[in-house]
Image (cartoon, helix red, strand yellow):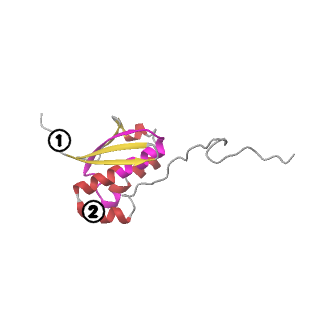
Amino acid sequence: MAEKKYFYGLGRRKSATARARLYAGKGNLTINDKPASEYLDGNKTLLAEITDPLALVGKQKDYDITVLVSGGGKAGQVDAIKLAIAKAITVDAADLRTTLKKAEFLRRDPREKERKKYGLRSARKREQYSKR
């Protein structure tokens, strides 16, 4: 059995990690061995957000994409997938890197959950102050 050639990209956001593989194909998107629309429960905005890097460079129908994603919630996973796909595109076509970089698809969002501090209810929430 011959190995299929693919382009790989890794994306992270909050506590989500996504590993994307781009194969030459017709535009099928599979997330964790499920069709993307099924994995995202038919949420069209999240689905459109995933394909933004492909739409920017006009390659929606050029690749079949398989993604393995873990951790976090749906929104964090979608951002991680988006970054992974953008990185994989640059592995295939290095000339598209500047286009993707200007549109900020190659930036990892550094915001993480702030840790809870002792003596507080959450990261910053305190007990209500009582004067008397």
Q: Residue furthest left?
A: 1
Residue 1 higher or lower than 78, as above or below: above
- In this view, the residue in front, 41 or 116, is 116
Q: Which mark is residue 4?
A: 1
- The span shown in magenta is 55-83
Residue 118 appears left or right of 48:
right
Asked whether residue 47 appears in the rendered view, the answer is: no
Residue 81 higher or lower than 101, as above or below: above
Q: Are marks 2 and 1 in contact (CB under 8 Å)?
A: no
Q: Position of residue 81 (x, y in %)?
A: 38, 47
Identify the residue at image location x=76%, y=45%: 128
Q: Quadrant of residue 2?
A: top left
Residue 54 magenta-drawn? no
Q: Position of residue 85 (x, y in %)?
A: 32, 50
Instruction: Name the residue tied to disc 2.
Output: 96
**What amino acid is found at the position of numbered circle 1 in the picture?**
Lys
Residue 6 appears left or right of 109:
left
Asked whether residue 74 appears in the rendered view, the answer is: yes
